[in-house]
Structures are given as C-alpha cells and as structure tokens.
Image (cartoon, grey):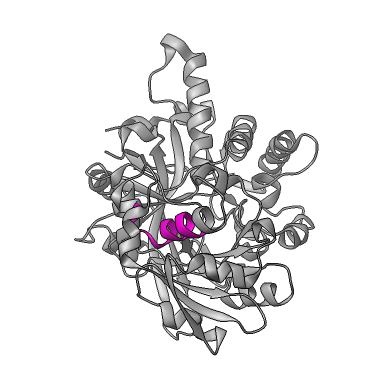
Amino acid sequence: MAEIQPLRGWRYNSELSQQIDAYVSPLFDVVSVKQREALYRNPLNSIHLSVPRGEDAAGAAAQRLREWQEQGVLLQDELPGIYVYYQYFRLAGSSREYCRKGFMCHIRATDWAENVVLRHENTLPAAVNDRAELLARTGFQTSATHGLYRDDAFELEHYMDEAMRSPLYQTEEDYQGARDVLAVIQDARVIRQFQQVLAQREVILADGHHRYEGSLAYRQARRAAAGAAYTGHEAWNFHLMYLTNAAADDLRILPTHRLVLELPGGLTSAELLARLAPYFTVLPLEDAYDLPERIAGKPWAFGLYLGEGQAYKIRLRPEVHELLAWDTTPEVKALDLTVLHYFVLEKVLGVTGPEAQRQWSGTAYVRNFPECLARVDRGEARAAFITNEVTMAEVEAVCHSGSVMPPKSTFFYPKTIGGFLFSSIQDSETFAPFYAAFRS
C-alpha cells in the first residue's frame, strides 16, 4: 500500500510569506492566458518555476531556482515534517463555509500496474513529457498533486486540527476564492501514525495525473541510469502529494459541461433533435436557466441548449443503455458522461471511439453554466450539453474497476495552489539522515 515520507519543505522566506498571496499561482493546467500574464509580471511569483516560458523554459526555471535559493528567496526548513493544508471555501448559492482538510508529504511514485496509486483519467504524452523535463532540470516540485485515501474513522484529523492552532501562514483569498492555510507536524511519533494509516490504504489520484506521470517517467529514467546501484531510497522515487480523506463531506466535485463548437456535416438544430430522439426522451423547457435543477439527481439526464432560448431536458431511454458497446467496465458504462459521449458524440455526431473524441477539436469543456449559454448565444458554439457532477462513489468504483472515465469527468474543487510549499528530490536529499528514520 501507500508509502509516505516527511520532507524538509522549501518555502518563501518569512518576510515574503507574510504576503504569500502575491507569490502563489494556479496549477499549470488551469491557469488562463490572462492570469499567466499578470503573474509573470511579478519576478518572484511561483509561476516562473511551475509554468516557465521561453525557448528553454525548463532551463530558465532551473536558473531562477538557483538564484532564489542563493538569494534566500526560498529557504528550506531545518526539520522534516508533514505539512497540514486546509482550504476554506464556499460554493455559489450557498452560505456554508466548507473546510477541506488534508496534508502534504512525499509519497513513493508507483506505477499504475502496482495498484497503489489509482487513476481515473488518461493523460496526454506531450503534457507528461513537459512535466518530466521540468522535474529533470530542476529536481523541484512546485505544487502538490491531489490524492484521496479513505478513512471512515478519521484517525488523522485531530492531529491536523492541533497543528492548525499554530499556522505557518495563509492566503487572504486565492485565485478561486478559497482561503489556504499551512501548518506543519514535526513530531516523529505523530508522523509515524500518518505513515501507518496510509500503509493500509490505496490512494486515488484526484488531480495531477500529468504531474504524477511526469514523476514516474523521471523515476524510470533515473532508475535505468542507476543500474545495479539503485537502492529504492533515492529521493527521486518520491512525489509531492496533498492527501485528503474521501470520507469527508468537504470533498466537492463540480460538473464540467460540454460545448459542441460545430455540428458535423452541417447538421441543423432540428436535425440534431431528430437524431437524438431514438436514444433520448426530449422535453422542451421554457427557461434555459432551469436546466441544472431539472436534471439534478436524475441518471443519464442532460440539459441541451441550442441558442435563442431553445432549451431541452434529454434523458436516455432505459432500454437503450444495453446498446452501449464500448469495451469498458460496467462501472464506466453506468456513468452519465459515458452515456453522453457514446450516444451523443459517437452515435449522433459520428465521432467514433474514446480516442477520436479525446482528439476531436469540436468539443470544449466549460465548468460555468451561464458561460455555456452565453457562448451558444454568441455563436461560439452550436450546442451546450449540461451535465450533473460525478459522485465520489462513482470515482472510487471506476478506479477500483481498473478503468478510466471519459476526459474531463471530474473537477475537484478547490484546486491546490502552486508555490505554497515546494519540495526537492535532488540527490542531496537522498542522504538526509531523517529519511532513514522514517523508512518502513
């Protein structure tokens, strides 16, 4: 099962960390062009390490990292620890403040086939190679991926709550509206308790598949180069991960809707509706803004918006589901998004097969419901398919089935942020004496 280790984190110095909002950044795969440009203007923002730019972007990041370490911009903690990370947030339309509780540590990067860290998404090779190159050039991890373990007894929460009584620093409000708080546990006895709990469990990767696979690729390359000298204790065997309890009620997964930018073959809206009819019941609605409420909690139900006020609730006819012929597990076939991708994208629009759909440029993925309607009304898309969120139970079922979901199935909210805590996997870390004390 999962092997975790404490680490000596690298952090912005005490003066800069008092204004930590100025130095944190969104994850590399969710930051917009506009956000990037604003962040790049700050010469000390973490985006220069996590999403570097230039002809030799990875080399530029490595050079900047050396400069920041030499100048004391970033300092390494003297003692190893487990870093407790809480995110306080609210959801639109709700007055409740949630608190997602978790901790950051090093976890041994194991191949998917070992069934220790489980995935629910496929990855794009180019993005994996980009992350692996950056890791190889810097030996530094700038943001934690997000993993889930299940502990119905909540054995670790009281240790984390105790640590949060003396936080290291916190954001006022990050780019997504969350308040992020960091603390550290350096008590060896407590750290071993964390290790014991995780040693009995698998970890589901919620976010960061490309960064995790980048770590795997780098580890494989280093292991091959080491040959007979490989021990398994090298620092590059480990990956920075933020771990949260899947049993908690503060774990939120938001829906990601589908925009169809062009209808293949010049289909009209009327022809699209006619093609949907053999598979779905189609119910016209007067108000498009009622779509999320009308499909909420209903399996295989979707909202459809075609512009100019044309809104429909569509729901798969139950007897049709057995026609779903993709070679995948029953757990994946049961998903709303599998139904949408098979019966709409493949059967109705003719984009055949999961791989072709992943590569098809005719789909856009949008999380904001009003934006979906607006983009159709502006003529930027021909149709919007509104979806329900995936549940945590569905994520766990798919992961344990050994299969993966359609692309962009989950949006765990809020995202972790870059620059809140850095970790090193340089060779010098391998020989830190504290690692030996915490080896299982």
Q: Is residue 316 above or below residue 286?
A: above
Q: Is residue 57 left or right of residue 363?
A: right
Q: Is residue 77 visible?
A: no
Give the total number of marks visible in the rendering: 0
Q: Is residue 83 magenta?
A: no
Q: Horizontal and vertical percent for residue 79? A: 43, 44
In the visual, does 85 lie left or right of 401? right
Q: Would residue 324 be found to the left or right of residue 345 on screen?
A: left
Residue 147 in view here? yes
Please name whichever residue, 208 or 241, is drawn nearer the observer in this view of the structure.
208
Q: Identify the main secondary structure in magenta.
A: helix
User: Along the line of sight, which residue is nearer the eye, 349 or 290?
Assistant: 349
The quarter of the displayed image where residue 307 is located:
bottom right
In the image, farthest residue toward the left: 153
Front position in the image: 119 or 133: 119
Percent x, y for residue 63? Answer: 73, 36
Residue drawn at x 44%, y 47% is 241
Q: Quarter holding the C terminus?
A: top left
Residue 335 part of the magenta-drawn span: yes
Quadrant placement of the N terminus: top left
The stretch of residues the image draws in magenta is 333-344
Q: Residue furthest top?
A: 228
User: Residue 67 placed where, x, y %?
Assistant: 72, 40
Of residue 248 and residue 288, the one placed in the foreground of this image is: 288
Q: Is residue 195 above or below residue 321?
A: above
Identify whether 122 is placed above or below 300: above
Q: Residue furthest bottom?
A: 286
Rendered location of residue 275, percent (x, y) = 53, 65
